[in-house]
Amino acid sequence: QVQLVESGGGLVQAGGSLRLSCTVSGRTFSWYSMGWFRQAPGKERELVAAINFNGGSTNYADSVKGRFTVSRDDAKNTLYLQMNSLKPEDTAVYHCAADPRSHWSGTYPRSMQYDYWGQGTQVIVSS
């Protein structure tokens, strides 16, 4: 059974930074495409950032480009989301997710299947 556990969320003032972590256990992390999603109250869940199995390709929502960076450390079975210049609109519950089958590169695929999800970590950005 694959398990994903997020950490690093919290309360931060606008303009500040947080780094989210997602540790993965149970199977072979190095072969998974990974993504960060967020859901704010009253809004649909959206993809924030994705990274392919070898870290060579990434994809970001337009709203976070230039501010957020997704990375992975396969030796630690850990996915990261570095969030800088945070804005109140970034307030949401952030989930990491794993797609064990979509070994993409270059352009982010239209169809992904994220089979495994973490429990989420809350990020609150105050003005």
Image (cartoon, grey):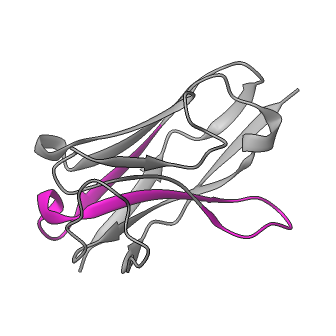
Taking the image as shown, residue 92 lies to the left or right of residue 76, namely right
- Quarter of the rendering occupied by the N terminus: bottom left
Taking the image as shown, residue 12 lies to the left or right of residue 121, namely right
In this view, 41 is above or below 59:
below
Magenta residues span 20-46
Task: Report which quarter residue 65 is drawn in.
Answer: top right
Count of numbered tags: 0
Task: Report which quarter residue 81 is drawn in.
Answer: top left
Give coordinates of residue 26: x percent, y percent: 18, 70
- Quarter of the rendering occupied by the C terminus: top right
* Residue nearer the viewer, 118 or 46: 46
In this view, 121 is above or below 72:
below
Give coordinates of residue 8: x percent, y percent: 51, 39
* Residue nearer the viewer, 61 or 34: 61
* Residue nearer the viewer, 96 or 108: 108
Give coordinates of residue 14: x percent, y percent: 78, 23
Taking the image as shown, residue 52 lies to the left or right of residue 127, namely left
Taking the image as shown, residue 103 lies to the left or right of residue 87, namely left
Magenta stretch: includes residue 39: yes
Q: Residue at x 21, y 44 (%)?
A: 56
Give coordinates of residue 126: x percent, y percent: 84, 30
In this view, 120 is above or below 9:
below
The residue at the far top in this view is 15
Magenta stretch: includes residue 82: no
Q: Residue at x 38, y 76 (%)?
A: 112
Q: Residue at x 75, y 45 (%)?
A: 91
Task: Report which quarter residue 30 is drawn in.
Answer: bottom left
